[in-house]
Image: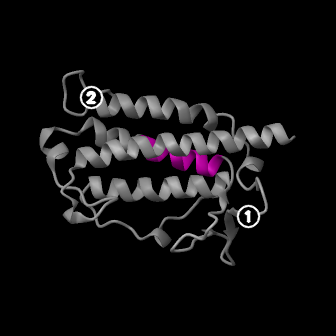
Amino acid sequence: MATPSPGSPGAQLRWQFDLAWSLFDYHLQRLVPEDFLWAPGPLVWTMHRTPEGGWRPDWANPEPDPIPVPTIGWVSWHLGWWWSTALDHARGRTPRERTEIHWPGPGDPTIAWLRALHDDWCEVLDGADADDLAAPAAYPWPADAGLRRAHLYAWANVELTKNAGEIGQLRLLRAAAG
């Protein structure tokens, strides 16, 4: 994939995304299947097998207090959920519901899913022109917030960085725990 030219409207967002992805990819390359469902404590949000063989995340709205610590599996599902929804918005598609975003499972299936979302996001950022960046955005905030797709793209890059930090810290804690 070609990175936008330095003067193009989406170049800075693509640079920011590439930096965030490099931080995330460091941990993706080192994850093993056992990392995904490791519980760092007694109060966690994780992924559960369904009778049909799929996976469902723990979820509550509003969030409980205290907020459970998520597993790598839960964070990776959450990342895939918001990223899939952001892609729907960026491409002008009807966004899928949270329950329509399915986690592939521990290990390589989820890593491949996240890498495919990476490739899709690169296409969005590489195709971002001034009109696209100025278009109204209604995600992840209300439609009447007055924000633009440039805000959506910047938010997604920051959210990726946050999720990379969460997954990386959980991976390191599991490794340190033996």
Kindly indicate the quadrant of the structure image that contains residue 75. bottom right
In the depicted structure, whether residue 122 falls above or below residue 92: above
Give the amino acid type for the residue marked by disc 1 in the picture. Answer: Leu
The amino acid type of the residue labelled 2 equals: Ala
Front residue of 31 and 158? 158
- Left or right: where 62 falls relative to 152: right
The magenta region covers: 108-118
Q: Position of residue 38 (x, y in %)?
A: 76, 53
Instruction: Name the quadrant of the C terminus.
Output: top right
Q: Nearer the viewer, mark 2 or mark 1?
A: 1
Q: Position of residue 27 (x, y in %)?
A: 63, 35
Question: Compared to 115, does 97 lie above or below?
Answer: below
Magenta stretch containing residue 71, yes or no?
no
Q: Quadrant of residue 58?
A: bottom right
Does 141 sit left or right of 107 as displayed?
left
State the separation of the CA atoms marked 2 and 1.
41 Å
Task: Tell me the crowding category of disc 1: few under 14, some 14 to 19, or many 20 or more residues within 10 angstroms, Cα based.
Answer: few
Image position, residue 1 (x, y; %): 36, 30
Q: Point out residue 143 in the picture as x, y percentages from the top left corner.
A: 22, 64
Please tell me which residue is depicted at 27% across the width and 62% down the height of the picture.
93
**Residue beneath disc 1:** 43
Furthest-left residue in this view: 131
Q: Is residue 1 visible?
A: no
